[in-house]
Amino acid sequence: MRLFAALWPPQQAVRELDRATMPLRNIPGAEALRWTQPESWHFTLSFYGEVTEDQAADLGARLARAAQRAEGPVPVRLAGAGRFGDRTLWAGLDKEDTDREALKKLAAATTAAGRRAGLLPPDEHPSFHAHLTLARARGRGRGSSGVDLRPYVTQLEPFQGSSWTARELLLVRSAPPRSAVPGEQPRYEPLDRWPLGP
């Protein structure tokens, strides 16, 4: 099973962002993007890849300790947008109303848990860039998709959602699409969750 550690936004934050992204689908070229579903929106802290049942149990115990060692719940506010080249469109976080340092520490702790569980190379220290993926270019590869994501970023840049508090660390399973229908999204199933803080 494919696992990752994540934070999940509350329904109010998801609804606000969903309303803000609706007009983006009318921008010329939007049909060339594969839009993610609001119910699957999340912030990935660490991605572990394929994991056995035994490894998942070990990882879960380590993530529970990482969550307990966190300073506590993390204030968060969705705001703005960005892109990774012309491959991925994402929503970001407000710089003033989000405790970015706490998020970085939590991401580092979940990565360390993966290393100690033998799921990540010991020398792997990925940089953490908090983002919530909204759309990906269809048929994307290493080259350009032919979709200019700058107009999408420009239109979404003024967005600011309500403040919320991330209170739980989740271990999530990514299940592949059930059918061979092009563009079908994976399903995300929380396997376990732990409160942040002692």
Image: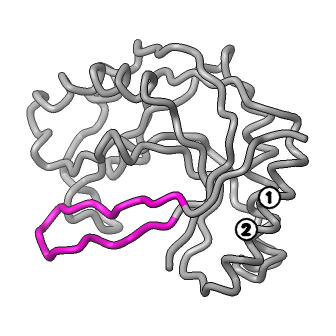
Q: Residue at point 57% right, 51% down?
A: 44
Residue at horizontal 47%, vertical 14%? 160
Residue 156 drawn at (x, y percent): 34, 21
Q: Which mark is residue 64?
A: 1
Q: Main secondary structure of the magenta part?
A: loop
> Where are the magenta residues, as a range?
173-190
Note whether 188 is above or below 23 in the view shown. below
Considering only vertical position in the picture, is 156 above or below 171? above
Locate residue 85, reporting x and y percent: 39, 47
Viewed as shown, does residue 12 lie left or right of 35? right
Of the numbered discs in the image, which one, if any, rests on residue 60?
2
Side of 57 where 189 appears, left or right: left
Asked if marks 1 and 2 touch (Cβ < 8 Å), the reply is yes
Label 1 neighbour load within 10 Å: few <14, some 14-19, many 20+: many
Q: Is residue 22 on the magenta stretch?
A: no
Badge 2: few (under 14), some or many (20 or more) residues near its Cα, within 10 Å? many
Q: Secondary structure at mark 1?
A: helix
Q: Residue at x 9, y 33 (%)?
A: 28
